[in-house]
Image: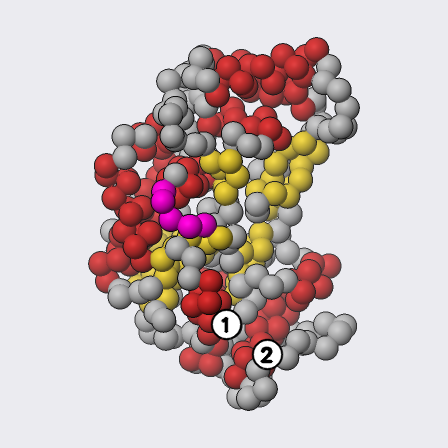
Amino acid sequence: MNMAFGVLTAREPQEIVTQLVDSLGQRDSIFVHHDYSQQPEFDVAREGVRLIPDYIRTGWGEPSLARAIFHLIRTALASSDFDYFQLLSGSCLPLQPVAALKSHLARRRSPILADLVNLDTDERALMSHGHRVFCRSQKLAARLLRRSRRWYFGESPVTIQQSNLGIHERVAPGAELTAMQWLGKQIHVAARAGLLDSHPFHGAMTPYIGSLWFCLRRDVCEYLVRQEERNPSVPYLMGLKVCDEVLFPTLLGNSSFGIAPSNHLVNRFNGAHPRTFEAADLPTLAASDQFFARKFAMDAMDPCRQAVIDLLIDRVDQHRAPSGYVPLPEPFQPAVLAPGADRQGFSLGSEALD
């Protein structure tokens, strides 16, 4: 099986992107879309890595980020004979060997591995994210929708982790709705019906939100890039706030392809962004059966980063052992290595991490 990894970077130091690339090995194609307008002095000098020269200027939550992802996938399709494409950020690291990921994909044979939430079947997600889906932010009605959301959740909502997203919840979710909460919900129901903006979610088109870090089979990648050019709903979806968390889940969720959960462990959210992993998170990272984790500190020497790289090297060793995979002994007490350091013959810059 051939993999292609697509990495989105903008402000991440080249040292941590190189660290990610080294941890993926050198047997599969790695495409890096870097926004040189935000960090001109950037390079990843590794075999098998292609830095996309005709980059797109990106901004968090802006349509340019979605266009960069389409561009990244289209470039990989034209340049690599891959079977699966895995999207990563510059702040990701693998938790399992690439060889284990390939075995997993070969067993599951899922066309799409992504975390999606259907807003038509999840009231909590509807109330948390509906204001970003059913009305474009430049519309006057968007102010009413945002205000009605505050009525429903109150000034101090609880943030829970769901499908690798931060979803708001009422402080007392089982309590009967107050009059203002009921009104806030009804305004969202009206927005879903298209009474506040002319959205495309009618008939068979279902609204989805989801985490961005998907893994797609090649034919799904081909389908997805066609949608950018041909799907009449894309201009509306591109115009939404933080559109990437609506656009890609909606296009994938409304396709005919089967969907399985993603390969990612995304850290708990603090507001609109996931927290940075710290030493206290190491037991969770070690116990996870996911293949990637996000997000890590922007420092290549960060102890948590180093511990996860050490964990990965151990698992590469175990994956290659004749007896098969052997779990790490408890408690997990990883050693801290400098970037590129050797440990029992394994080098982060070699093919050993495949």
In the image, residue 33 sits, relative to residue 145, either above or below, namely below
| In this picture, residue 230 sits left or right of residue 92 | left
Query: Does residue 251 appear left or right of residue 71 in this picture?
Result: right
Residue drawn at x 64%, y 43% is 161
Q: Can residue 43 be seen in this view?
A: no
Q: Residues within 10 Å of mark 1 (few under 14, many from 20)?
A: some
User: Can the viewer see residue 123?
Assistant: yes
Q: Is residue 40 shown left or right of residue 16? A: left
Give x and y (percent) for residue 63: 36, 36
| Residue drawn at point x = 43 percent, y = 57 percent | 110
Q: Is residue 251 magenta-colored?
A: no
- Residue at 39 percent of width and 55 percent of height: 111
Whole-percent x, y for residue 216 in the image:
38, 55
Q: In which quarter of the image is residue 240?
A: top left
**Three-letter code for the amino acid on which mark 2 is drawn:** Tyr
On residue 325, which mark appears? Answer: 2
Q: Identity of the amino acid at label 1?
A: Ala
At a point 55% along the width and 14% down the height, the residue shown is 187
Q: Position of residue 3 (x, y in %)?
A: 37, 66
Look at the image and give the residue range highlighted in magenta. 255-259
Front residue of this view, candidates 273 and 96: 96
Secondary structure beneath dot 1 equals helix
Q: How crowded is mark 2: few (under 14 residues within 10 Å), some or many (20 or more)?
A: some
In this rendering, the answer to whether 224 lies above or below 78 is above
Residue named by callout 1? 100
Viewer-proximal residue, 55 or 184? 184
Tell me the quarter of the image containing the C terminus. Answer: bottom left
Sequence-first disc among 1 and 2: 1
